Amino acid sequence: APQPDRKLPLPAPRLDQARYFPGCVVLLSCGGCGWRRRYDPLRIAHRLYTLGDGGLQTPVADVAARIKAACARCGARRWHACLAYPPGLDEREAIRLRRRLRD
């Protein structure tokens, strides 16, 4: 079985807080069946900005509320979103990404 994503313990994260956690993603999950998909937070913020519907200050929970599409697996329309580290990201990779952002 694949490793689960590690959710970040933030009370009400915004998309701009992703820059403090290099390598993190927006984890979108279906409330009906638990299907999950990972997205780049900056791409989501850029898309919301171009649509005039938000930007970097958008709370991650609001991203899930804006999704109108039904789940491909079960057809439910209940979505949850959070910031998480993908399963393949180890400590060395996180340090490398942190240094790349710093330099």
Image: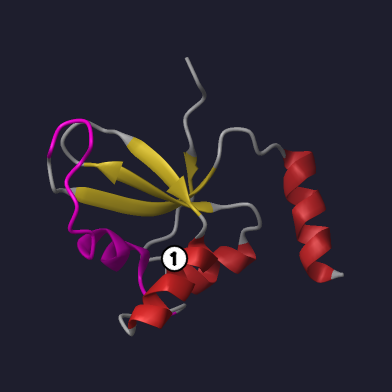
Q: Position of residue 28 (x, y in %)?
A: 35, 48
- For mark 1, give the secondary structure: helix
In the shown orientation, is residue 63 left or right of residue 1? left
- From this view, report whether residue 48 is shown above or below residue 64: below
Q: What x and y, as percent, mark residue 58? A: 37, 75
Tell me: 103 left or right of 58: right
* Residue 70 included in the magenta stretch of the image: yes
**Which residue is at a point 52% across and 57% down the rendered structure image?**
40
Q: Which residues are magenta?
A: 57-75
**Does the magenta stretch mainly form a helix, a strand or a loop?**
loop
Q: How is the image coloured?
A: secondary structure
> 46 or 97: which is nearer to us?
46
Q: Position of residue 92 (x, y in %)?
A: 79, 41
Query: Which quadrant would the C terminus be assigned to in this image?
Result: bottom right
Residue appearing at x 19%, y 41% in the figure: 31
| Residue type of the residue flagged with mark 1 | Ile
**Which residue is drawn at the image coordinates 55% and 40% (left, top)?**
86
Q: Residue furthest right?
A: 103
Identify the residue shown where x is 31% and y is 64%: 63
Observer-nearest of 53 and 23: 53
Query: Would you name the residue on which mark 1 appears?
Result: 44
Other residues around mark 1 within 10 Å, as few (<14) / some (14–19) / many (≥20): some
Q: How many callouts does the rendering have? A: 1
Instruction: Check the image and name the residue furthest to the bottom.
Output: 52
Asked if residue 39 lies in the magenta stretch, the reply is no
Q: Work out which residue is located at the far left of the displayed protein and give it.
A: 76
The image quadrant that residue 50 belongs to is bottom left
**Residue 87 relative to residue 4: left or right:** right
* Residue 55 in which image quadrant: bottom left
Query: Looking at this view, is 60 or 38 the one in front?
Result: 38
Q: Position of residue 48 (x, y in %)?
A: 38, 75
